[in-house]
Amino acid sequence: MDKRLYQAWESCVKCGICRSVCPVFKEEKSEPYVARGHITLLSEFIKGNIDFKEETAKDYLYKCLLCTTCVESCPNNSETDTIVEITRHEVIKRHGLPMYKKVLSKLLKNRKLMDFAFKSATTFSPLFVKEINNPRKGINLRISLSEIERNRTLPPLSKKTFLDKYGSNKNRAEIAIFPGCLINYTYIEIGDAFIDILNKLKIDFTVPKKQLCCGAPIYFAGNFEDTRYLAEKNIELFLNLDVEKIIILEPTCASMIKIDYPKLFMYFEDKKWEEKARKVAEKIIDPISYLYNLANIKERLRKLDIKTTYHDPCHLKRALKVKDEPRYFLKAITNYNEMKEADRCCGNGGTFSIDYRDVSLKIASRKVKNIVDSKAEYLVTTCSACLMQLTDILHLENKDNIKTVHLLEILNEALEV
Amino acid sequence: MNAKRKAYDMLKKKLKNKCLTDTLSRIQYAYDATQKMYPPDIVILAEDTNDVALTIKIANKYKIPVVPRGWGSGFTGGTLNVDGGICLSLEKMDKVIELDLENMMIWVEAGMVNWDLQGYVKPYGLFFPPDPSSWKFSTIGGNIAENAGGPRAVKYGVMKDWVKGLELVLANGSVITVGSKNIKDVAGYDLVDLIVGSEGTLAIVTKALLKLHPLPEAKKTMQIVFDNMREAAVMVNKILLSGVIPVAIEFVDKFAIKTVKDATGVDLPDADAILIIEVDGNKAEVELQTQKIEQLAKDNKSVISFSIAKNAEEEEKVWFARRTISPTLKRIANDKLNEDIVIPRSKLAEMIERLEKISKKYDLSIVNFGHAGDGNIHVNIMYHTDSADETKRANRAMEEVFDECIKLGGSITGEHGVGITKQDFLEKQLGRTQVELLRRIKKAFDPNNIINPHKMRL
């Protein structure tokens, strides 16, 4: 048994402080949906005292965003996320994966298959999606399994992926770029913005063609075996690069590779790969911190006359501990107004937003008032999943006048040639 | 057993999906901050007073224990179903019933979280003074049950000073309202004061009428560092004698200072004790109070330094040491016996010295901090659970702490209550006759002994 599990159980003193911060608990208001409840149930499960067969019981395990707000506020930093992930893995070992998560795993492991799926989706997209009139350009599904899902605003798919556009076999450069699947397939314009910035700053980069999905969606679902495959492929690829830094555009992917890859190999007690993962981790940085540390960028940014506010993505703030740098830029170049509870999870949580769309939306809805109160014209964030979720909720609540935008797009706009 | 089955069937029939009986749910409602586990047979998620009354009626008919529960953050096992039975959760009863601005009072349901109440009244320029450390995750019902208080108790008192009325469900299921909005009211025994602090053993509190207070215009935080704990204790009395009543006077002893320093690397002075003092009022009052305290500090030879926080950031820095102690204790040993003894203010220094002796005698770290203004000391005896010998020593040391505390005219608990964790010591403090009287009161309220039984050895 993983000794980190025991540490996490032991460090929980059941004080209940997590009840005051957990976004899911705020909606559900009952013990199974808060860290203290998770930790108790999961420890009973791992000890073999209970099982997660029934549907409601599985809810107890999957209705967690892994946003780590509880870890941040816990006096003993009990790692609820680790416990939840490992328990999900144990459940999969016993009861298998749900069908759509199986398909997802297959897709993620095979770039060609994934490209094929996304491109066919693009070709046939007019059949099952309709564009909506929204500044971010979103789409709504025409047909879907559930009524709620049908109203969901998703980013439009693109014919040419980020890797199609920029992918290369070049091994040596100043930096390497890992876009992450959302930017690769849908929010390509965010990736474009970063490439523009690099070109303006004359920074030599490479976008390794052979990179695979980081595995976050299936790792968080507890599918450690398939994640391991992806992790090893990516680590090998990164170790062969002769670069100073590896910039991972998505905070979730960045924290996955930097923090969770070593954790994964710790779980498998694979010292050799853990070592390799740690070596890669040293080079990994998010694009905002990378730009912030550059000497020649700050004086080249012009002031934009727009009102902005910022939403902290969980993985950037709580996993990678980056919160000041985005604000530095926004304060320097825009009329910035901090919203209340800027670091409150948006409720996306990856597949959480598919499995529990109703709760996910309720959580997102709590952000809307704070966003409106900030009087911002632009809601800025640094994560595509948050961007998708917040665009969705603003559209649902008729607040399309507030535009959602990635900080890289703003920086590109402000950066003089 | 048959009676239980009948009762639970009836509850399920009447309350339907407000009843949880599956193993997983029962585990979820089996614990509190004592970390002990006692799964109830059935959990009732009450949504209003009717649900509570119905549950109590059925429980009374079949003589089944009912344990009321809020957010389950208690330290003494008050919400544990030690003898199975019904867990009566009031967490869904969290609404404001009436805000009476003219009388500066508010009726709320018992399941409302203290912090949410603070947020609710703040826009009206008001606040609710009792501020237990757990105020973000403990309910008004729980605060009433334990007669909770916090750092602000020096100036603003504890729960009993702010509860004016209660809606109660009695053991036979009848619903009554005790107390009133009158400032003066001496009609009959004061049942409000009896219920506040009764640890949920006499009746179920479903609603509470609470007094509110206008938010002060300003506040200021100061820090005084001493080379002598005794002098720090003397200073507390001097400040109060001078006519200044601070909101809070907190202290941190030398072991606590060392713990925080070792754990966080924060630059704290090598001192015997630190006092953190907060004053509030209108701007002129705050200024005057600050000056008086500053003068007292200047006149004292044991004071190493005196500082005033100039802004929120510096305030945070001053409070940092005090707030960081609890979480950092784990670095000394993996477990602690944590008790909240209270002694007359004048005996503070003497008690600290006795604690030091006990620490030496049993060869265990004892870290102390707490509310110097009201004599409430959080005593933390640190020990390693994997050592049977240390565990035994820790328990003996704690008994001696209680003995010494009682000898000095103190009490075994200032805030957390007796529950199950301190029930063995209650008679020691109160004496047999008094405990017998408590038992008779309990019996008068609850003849079948169904409401939170087996607590406080009642």
Image (cartoon, coloured by chain):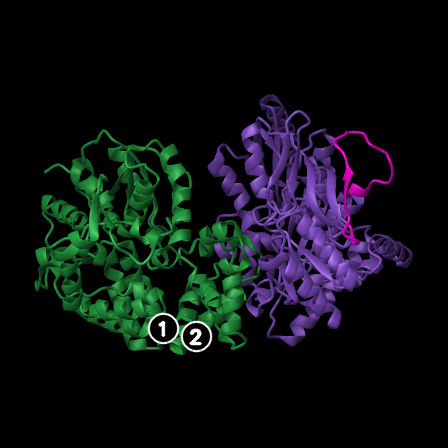
Left or right: residue B232 compared with residue A96? right
Q: Magenta segment range?
A: B170-192
Residue A203 drawn at (x, y percent)? 11, 50
Note the chain letter of the purple one. B
Which residue type carries mark 1?
Answer: Met
> Is there a contact, CB below 8 Å, between mark 2 and mark 1?
yes
Label 1 marks a residue whose chain is: A
Foreground residue among B358 and A118: A118
Q: CA distance from mark 2 to mark 1?
A: 9 Å
Note the chain letter of the green one. A
Foreground residue among A292 and B193: B193
Q: Quadrant of the N terminus of chain A?
A: bottom left
Quadrant position of residue B162: top right
Foreground residue among A230 and B49: B49
Residue A152 drawn at (x, y percent)? 30, 49
Which residue bears the numbered disc 1?
Answer: A266
